[in-house]
Amino acid sequence: MTRPLAVVTGASRGIGREVAVMLAAGGADLVLVGRTDDQLEVVAELVTAAGGAATTIVADLATAAGTEHAVAELGRLPGPVAILVNNAGAAGPYGAGWELDPLAWERMLHLNLTAPFRLCAGVVPGMIAAGFGRIVNVTSSASLEPLERTGAYSVAKAGLNMLTRQLAAELREHAGISVVALAPGPADTATYAELADQPAELVGVRGFERYRRTVAEGRLSPPRRPARVIAALAFEPTAARSGAYVDIGDEYATRALESGS
């Protein structure tokens, strides 16, 4: 039986790394997309050990050139992509909107929204032809209300939610394909560590205190926790959940975590 092909962005560390290994253990072969070749090779070895084949694509998805490269490489794959996990993302730039460098804003908007759109557009035709596909867009609860002095991130993730709903609506007649957004909550990743390390004058007093308190109280979840929910969505047997926003505290996520424990 042919193993499904799964693409994971931001695969070199954190949630992406855990997702890649779980998908391999669940029966998928992997295409790992990230910025750092040596880190991707480490994950590729873990994927192989878990039973999957691994291909790596080194690309910076915060740039148009990097995204074009990744999309072109996916187009050269021998078979259709069955699973796409748009996990790559970052917070920042920090400050009120009128204080920000517009180029920094555009770079983060590209990473968190435009790159996922381009990757979805690249793989969906193959999913339609195959009659099957699972897309999981990693979003954030910051998409539901403004995140103080981190507007590019909140705006981009809100856009990612709507992209999820839009694609789900457009794919409604293709019953074998689903597109879902997953908010992983605060996790013990380099992205959250970078956010919590910012001074109060950059991220605002309320944000500064919230991030530091979350770390101090040990409320950061290990990356494998949201990764388990993403893997469940990737292997979901029906597409009935397409278009949904799933929070790590939702009933679906709770069941996925309990079944995987």
Image: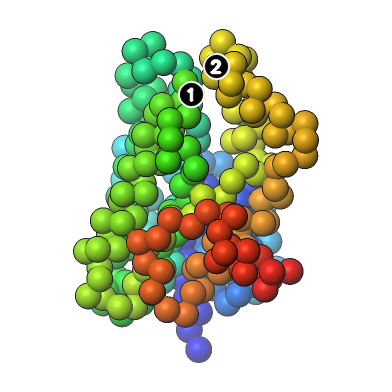
Residue 19 in the image: state x and y as whole percent. 59, 59
Residue 31 placed where, x, y %? Answer: 49, 61
**Splitting the image into 4 quarters, where does residue 123 fall?**
bottom left
Residue highlighted by disc 2: 204
SS assignment at label 2: loop
- Residue 27 seen from this side: yes
Label 1: which secondary element:
loop
Expressed as whole percent of the image width and height from the top left, the position of residue 147 reads: 47, 29
Q: Is the Cβ of the residue at disc 2 closer than 8 Å to that at disc 1? A: yes
Residue at 59 percent of width and 46 percent of height: 185
Residues packed near mark 2 inside 10 Å, few (<14), some (14 to 19) or many (20 plus): some
Apparent side of residue 143 relative to residue 44 in the rendered image (left or right): left
- Residue 79, label in figure: none
Report which residue position mark 1 lands on.
148
| On screen, residue 25 above or below 41 | below
Q: How far apart are marks 2 and 1 (CA)?
A: 6 Å
User: What amino acid does circle 2 point to?
Assistant: Gly
Residue kind at label 1, given as amino acid type: Glu
Q: Quadrant of residue 127?
A: bottom left
Q: From where the camera sits, is residue 33 visible?
A: no
Q: Which is more N-terminal, label 1 or label 2? A: 1
> Looking at the image, which residue is at 26% across and 56% down?
166
Classify residue 186 as left or right of residue 32.
Answer: right
